[in-house]
Amino acid sequence: MSKPTDLVQGTLDLLILKMVALEPMNGWAIGQRLKQLSSDVLQVSDGSLYPALHKLEQEGWVTSEWRPSENNRRAKFYSLTAAGRKQLRVEAGNWERLAQAITSVVRLQEV
């Protein structure tokens, strides 16, 4: 199982930006959705998720508003801003380059 400390530096930002690009979500829903989409491989703790959300909000990449959640509790919902959409493209491009580079090394034939 991957833990937040196992994630490549900056990957959590990319994952959060992608989740809120799909639809506005609260923190709990973001964590659950990541877990679901990754077949339980990505399990992000609250101690990692909420500071990352706060940072993304400070950067101006997400905005938030308080509203009722699915279970009618008050929750902070995050949405992607125009700057966040641009940053998502940058982060996704960086990830693609890194993943391709790592894949190239891992697939080297042993002698």
Image: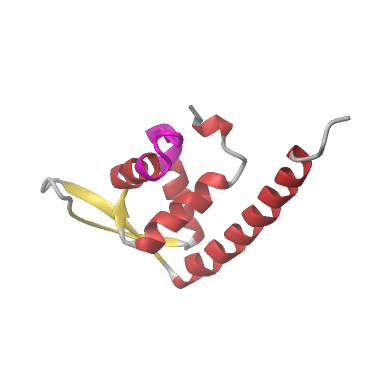
Residue found at the very far bottom of the displayed protein: 82
Task: Give me the residue at 49% from left, 68% from top.
Answer: 85
Task: Give me the residue at 39% from left, 45% from top.
Answer: 37
- In this rendering, the answer to whether 19 lies above or below 36 is below
Quadrant of the rendered structure where residue 92 is? bottom right
- In this rendering, the answer to whether 96 lies above or below 85 is above
- Decide if residue 91 is in sight here: yes
Q: Position of residue 107 (x, y in %)?
A: 75, 40
Task: Give me the residue at 63% from left, 61% from top.
Answer: 93
Between 18 and 27, the residue placed more toward the observer is: 18
- In this rendering, the answer to whether 104 lies above or below 4 is below
Q: Position of residue 43 (x, y in %)?
A: 42, 34
Marks counted in the figure total: 0
- Decide if residue 57 is in sight here: no
Q: Position of residue 4 (x, y in %)?
A: 50, 33
Task: Give me the residue at 59% from left, 46% from top.
Answer: 10
Residue found at the very far right of the displayed protein: 111
Between 100 and 32, the residue placed more toward the observer is: 100
Judged left or right of residue 73, residue 45 is right
> If the image is split into quadrants, where does the C terminus sit?
top right
Q: Position of residue 26 (x, y in %)?
A: 29, 50
The magenta region covers 36-49
User: Colour scheme of this structure image?
Assistant: secondary structure
Magenta stretch containing residue 44, yes or no?
yes
Quadrant of the rendered structure where residue 31 is? top left
Magenta stretch containing residue 19, yes or no?
no
Judged left or right of residue 65, residue 9 is right
Judged left or right of residue 69, residue 36 is right
